Amino acid sequence: MSDGEFDIIARYFDRHVAREDVLLGIGDDAAVLSLPANRRLVIAMDTLVDGVHFPKGTAAADIGYRALAVNLSDLAAMGAQPEWMTLSLCAPVSDPAWFDGFSRGLFELADRYQVALVGGDTVKGPLAVTVQIAGTVEADRWLTRAGARPGDLLFVSGVPGEAAAGLAVIQGSLPVTSATRHLRQRFLRPEPRVSLGRCLRNMATAAMDVSDGLLTDLDKLAGASGCGARIDVDALPLSSALLDTFARDACIDYALAGGDDYELLFTIPPQRVVELPSDVACTQIGVMTEREVQCWRDGNPFVPRRRGYDHFDM
Amino acid sequence: MSDGEFDIIARYFDRHVAREDVLLGIGDDAAVLSLPANRRLVIAMDTLVDGVHFPKGTAAADIGYRALAVNLSDLAAMGAQPEWMTLSLCAPVSDPAWFDGFSRGLFELADRYQVALVGGDTVKGPLAVTVQIAGTVEADRWLTRAGARPGDLLFVSGVPGEAAAGLAVIQGSLPVTSATRHLRQRFLRPEPRVSLGRCLRNMATAAMDVSDGLLTDLDKLAGASGCGARIDVDALPLSSALLDTFARDACIDYALAGGDDYELLFTIPPQRVVELPSDVACTQIGVMTEREVQCWRDGNPFVPRRRGYDHFDM
């Protein structure tokens, strides 16, 4: 027997919420939440579509995890603290095992950041997941893409390109090695840089998360800031997992143009570099300039083969 | 030439927002909003899927309007004031005429309620629209489904059943008359009862919006309140548009079980009925009881043919 919509919500998504600021959670027409007076509300919304944002056949738990991770990453890029989420789940059939896996993946990450699921919608249709995340940030300052200035140093967290390489591993059914397993996980289970974003709030001049590819996203950050940037391709952090699996030039392509990393790209004045937290690897990959986003490699201008990914670039 | 994702957002959705509480709108990783200190945040999220929540071939402007209307209705049921929304639009192709129509329908309603679009996502995939609405409500009181008491009078706004009848008109391609045209519009362009909800905030003991069918939704309200209800079928407000188009028994079916009305169902102590606003027709259709939700017709218990609609009732 299949579950009805209300059974699905009750069984898989309606969990006791320990947060005192959730005045009314799942089960009414809307949720009612209490925001501290000295905080601003920060909201973002991202959708994952089956076969577009993850390969068909991706495990339900990975989809659940990922749907929240990409949203947490948006809040990280603002320097905000995640607080509550709503979920719209569009699924073709009512499969208890699938819902169980999905909710486990979702709550694994939600619990880590103490994010409460406070509402949403469960509908029948082609598989797609939309999460809206709501967070808070101190009223005095939050991060945007718009504050970078020429001379600021350009940093990225983690290893950009691993997620796109991981997708290639999955889609190409590459042999399982510790390297390919690592890359695969980096696509399926991106680590939102929430605590790094919180640290950067009073330190970085601009920040965004890398979802569409490093160069495409850097174009946006530079454009919003009204300046340019120079990337030193030789400074890109290429992991041994990348280099063990792909040729160096392919690794550079993944690093510059691969999407789905959900690392933070940020700019910081040189004198503040010493304040960077040490628990997340951050690499200086370039510097902000007066105009144009350019790549340099071995001391020469370098034109990458592609710059990023646009879901409607048809 | 088709538009890329960022062009679509810039051209159709990124409008100048005059609201001072939108500290950062579309174009960054997230929106930053300012909430008055004495207000609570109220959020809801609803998804419309092509061929499930509206017939395939529905005009883009009607889909845009409806996607917001169903969300405004959720806030209305809480007595909340709508403020901001985010939009996730999943569309199979990048069709400028479609996006233009969709955004016109969406903003027609958004402008009426001064709701600002502050963020979201545009992705490629099967047509589906998710809107998250955020509103505010006074900190002292909001409406829920849970406050009804035996003896409270049961009211509904407008004419429940017209939307389901309108869907039948569309799906059955019934001849165009002023009656069928009215019913059709009631499905395509439901009127969210925002101002009524605001008036009811300090008057009603419980409220919800009728989205899945009057009886199904009344079951939820009565269940949440721990009481029962008795509906007087003869008191249901059947419009001339309904009665001109369908047999009386079919009209009663639509009124009791038809979804998509987005009218408010609410309970109110008898002594407060005089306070009801006069600008929205509200009809007393029953009374809250100790237990069970029952229908009566012509002085006898009446068992309706169906009670409502569950999207996962397969």
Image (spheres, coloured by chain):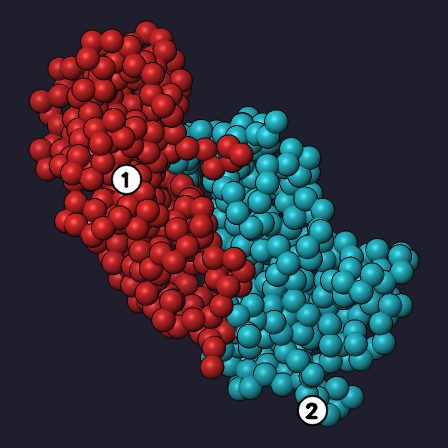
Chain colours: A cyan, B red
* Residue A233 in the figure: left or right of residue B210: right
What x and y, as percent, mark residue B142?
Answer: 30, 30
Q: How many marks?
A: 2
The quadrant holding residue B284 is: top left
On the image, the x and y values in percent for residue B210 come to: 32, 33
- Residue sitting at 16 percent across and 50 percent down? B177
Q: Are marks 2 and 1 in contact (CB under 8 Å)?
A: no
* Label 2 secondary element: strand
Coordinates of residue B221 in the picture (x, y in percent): 35, 22
Q: Tell me the mark number nearer the camera, choosing from 2 and 1.
A: 1
Other residues around mark 1 within 10 Å, as few (<14) / some (14–19) / many (≥20): many
Mark linked to residue A37: none
Q: Is residue A3 above or below residue B10?
A: above
Can residue A71 be seen here? The reply is: no
A139 on left or right of B301: right
Q: Quadrant of residue B255?
A: top left
Q: Is residue B220 visible?
A: yes
Chain to which mark 2 belongs: A
- Horizontal relation, residue B134 to residue A266: left or right: left
Whether labels 2 and 1 share one chain: no
Residue at the disc numbered 1: B165
Q: Residue at x 45, y 46 (%)?
A: B52
Q: Tell which of B24 and B165 is nearer to you.
A: B165
What amino acid type is highlighted by mark number 1?
Answer: Ala
B268 relative to A147, above or below: above
Q: Residue at (78%, 60%) from the top-left corner?
A: A170
Question: Against B24, is B269 above or below?
Answer: above
Label 2 neighbour load within 10 Å: few <14, some 14-19, many 20+ = some
Q: Which residue is mark 2?
A: A301
Q: Residue furthest top?
A: B290
Mark 2–mark 1 Cα distance, whole angstroms, equals 66 Å
